Image (spheres, rainbow, N blue to C red):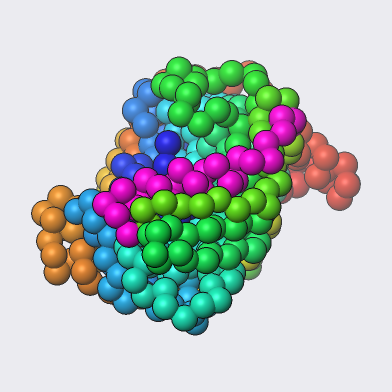
């Protein structure tokens, strides 16, 4: 199972499902409500009481690859061969890979009370998150050892990657506490599927040209929660072997100028990997034979795998989930008197809690009646600029959307992979990327009606938990209009 970064990195390019995307912000879709806990998904006097995806997966997926490794890894992924095009020896150049996926297999949400706009929901989703850094020299060695001519070769292969997948079972509660403030919470039980981490801190290679061999030394740390080569399809099923928990909190404030300010803390949690997981602290040298032969890649992999597993010890450990902090501002503008054409931009700032990543995005949805077209632009701390498009059909009781937050890069990668386009495979740019998302849900049940519009006489409703706390703190009652 070639998951060691030296031979593993190209897999980031060829995965079928890659989860962060911004186009759903403030759309009021079922997906938006589960990802942003303070977001409402029902419209009183228009929506029906229950929302459900009927087990049709709602998902988003994305990946990107930066650096000089783009062309060699695309060639390896799509043609089966490495190339040394663009790779630089001895200047500390590296490439960065990132991949994430978020798939909701079940989403159900219910409107509970007009007094506080209370909504509760349940969801089942599967998430994946991976990131890696690998040097130009790692790919050069996989392509050929001929360019390694001026020793010493120290710390040229200091690569790293982390990959984690898990199931997430969640319950959400959202309430409009006052006319200008809403709050939501999402509590989740996590069941880990896979975890791998490799960190190479020091490396050295010495070539024996006469014998077509090389001595490779690596020092670092490796973690894995399963036995390599023995992971099978049934291991994807939920089990309590690797339990965890997470929490998401969200709040929305409506200002006097009709701006919606939203603050979220998302997926702040942990997973406890079971006692038969493996940790290896390695500092070992192996001799690689046939360093220039046709089986060069297999020989490199076998020896690298042997090194990083040389210090194996079983034991449990705890890892964090990829939590994020987000702040957004949104305002709607109507362009005609009959309120058919609306522009509702959202500015989003996002920071990863446990990693160095941060992103700024501007979401520009244009809505005409029930049709919505969205242009999304974003830039992250690595200087990567993305532009995406979304098409949505959105009524009070039906929603369908499809799109990509990296339209051009996704199209280029598709042409490279499916059409085997040499121009796209050998094209070097700021980054190689792909992004795709799709969603659908329906609402059913009785129409949510205010008492003045109701077809039946309501029996009375109690305020929600958050509103009772709000009234207690600010000494208000339910008759003051708040």
Residue 209 found in image quarter: bottom left
Q: Is residue 306 magenta?
A: yes
Q: Nearer the viewer, residue 272 or 267?
A: 272
Q: Is residue 169 visible?
A: yes
Q: How many marks?
A: 0
Residue 296 % position (x, y): 34, 53
Residue 297 % position (x, y): 36, 51
Residue sitting at x 52%, y 43%: 305
Q: Nearer the viewer, residue 353 or 326?
A: 353
Q: Nearer the viewer, residue 372 or 413?
A: 413
Residue 90 versus residue 408 in the image, above or below: below
Q: Nearer the viewer, residue 138 or 206?
A: 206
Residue 319 found in image quarter: top right
Residue 420 found in image quarter: bottom left
Horizontal side, residue 400 vs residue 170: left or right? left
Magenta range is 292-316
Residue sitting at x 59%, y 58%: 217
Residue 205 % position (x, y): 53, 64
Residue sitting at x 64%, y 19%: 240
Horizontal side, residue 64 vs residue 93: left or right? left
Q: Is residue 267 magenta?
A: no
Q: Is residue 221 visible?
A: no
Residue sitting at x 67%, y 48%: 282
| The N terminus: image quadrant | top left
């Amino acid at each position: 199972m070639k998951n060691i970064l030296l031979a593993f990195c190209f897999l980031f390019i060829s995965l079928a499902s890659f989860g962060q995307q911004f186009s759903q912000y403030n759309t009021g879709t079922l997906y938006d409500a589960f990802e942003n806990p303070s977001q409402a998904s029902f419209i009183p006097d228009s929506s029906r009481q229950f929302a459900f995806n009927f087990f049709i997966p709602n998902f988003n997926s994305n990946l990107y690859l930066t650096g000089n490794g783009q062309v060699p890894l695309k060639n390896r992924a799509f043609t089966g061969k490495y190339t040394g095009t663009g790779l630089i020896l001895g200047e500390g150049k590296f490439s960065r890979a990132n991949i994430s996926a978020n798939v909701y297999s079940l989403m159900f949400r219910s409107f509970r009370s007009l007094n506080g706009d209370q909504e509760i929901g349940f969801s089942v989703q599967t998430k994946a998150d991976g990131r890696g850094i690998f040097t130009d020299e790692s790919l050069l060695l996989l392509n050929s050892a001929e360019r390694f001519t001026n020793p010493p070769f120290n710390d040229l292969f200091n690569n790293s990657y982390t990959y984690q997948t898990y199931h997430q079972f969640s319950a959400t509660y959202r309430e409009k506490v006052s006319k200008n403030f809403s709050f939501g919470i999402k509590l989740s039980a996590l069941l880990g599927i896979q975890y791998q981490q490799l960190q190479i801190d020091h490396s050295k290679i010495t070539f024996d040209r006469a014998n077509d061999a090389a001595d490779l030394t690596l020092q670092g740390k490796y973690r894995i929660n399963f036995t390599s080569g023995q992971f099978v399809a049934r291991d994807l099923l939920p089990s309590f072997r690797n339990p965890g928990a997470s929490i998401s909190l969200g709040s929305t404030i409506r200002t006097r100028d009709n701006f919606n300010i939203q603050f979220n803390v998302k997926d702040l949690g942990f997973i406890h990997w079971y006692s038969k997981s493996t940790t290896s602290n390695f500092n070992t040298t192996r001799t690689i034979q046939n360093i220039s032969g046709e089986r060069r890649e297999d020989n490199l992999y076998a020896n690298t795998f042997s090194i990083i597993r040389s210090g194996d010890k079983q034991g449990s450990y705890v890892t964090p989930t990829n939590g994020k902090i987000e702040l957004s501002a949104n305002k709607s503008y109507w362009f005609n008197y009959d309120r058919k054409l609306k522009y509702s931009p959202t500015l989003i700032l996002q920071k990863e809690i446990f990693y160095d990543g941060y992103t700024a995005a501007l979401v520009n949805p244009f809505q005409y009646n029930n049709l919505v077209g969205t242009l999304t632009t974003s830039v992250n701390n690595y200087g990567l600029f993305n532009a995406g498009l979304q098409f949505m059909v959105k009524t009070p009781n039906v929603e369908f959307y499809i799109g990509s937050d990296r339209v051009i890069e996704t199209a280029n990668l598709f042409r490279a992979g499916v059409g085997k386009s040499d121009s796209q495979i050998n094209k070097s740019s700021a980054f190689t990327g792909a992004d795709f998302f799709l969603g659908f849900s329906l609402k059913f049940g009785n129409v949510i009606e205010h008492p003045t519009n109701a077809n039946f006489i309501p029996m009375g409703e109690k305020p929600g938990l958050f509103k009772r706390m709000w009234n207690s703190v600010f000494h208000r009652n339910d008759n003051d209009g708040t």
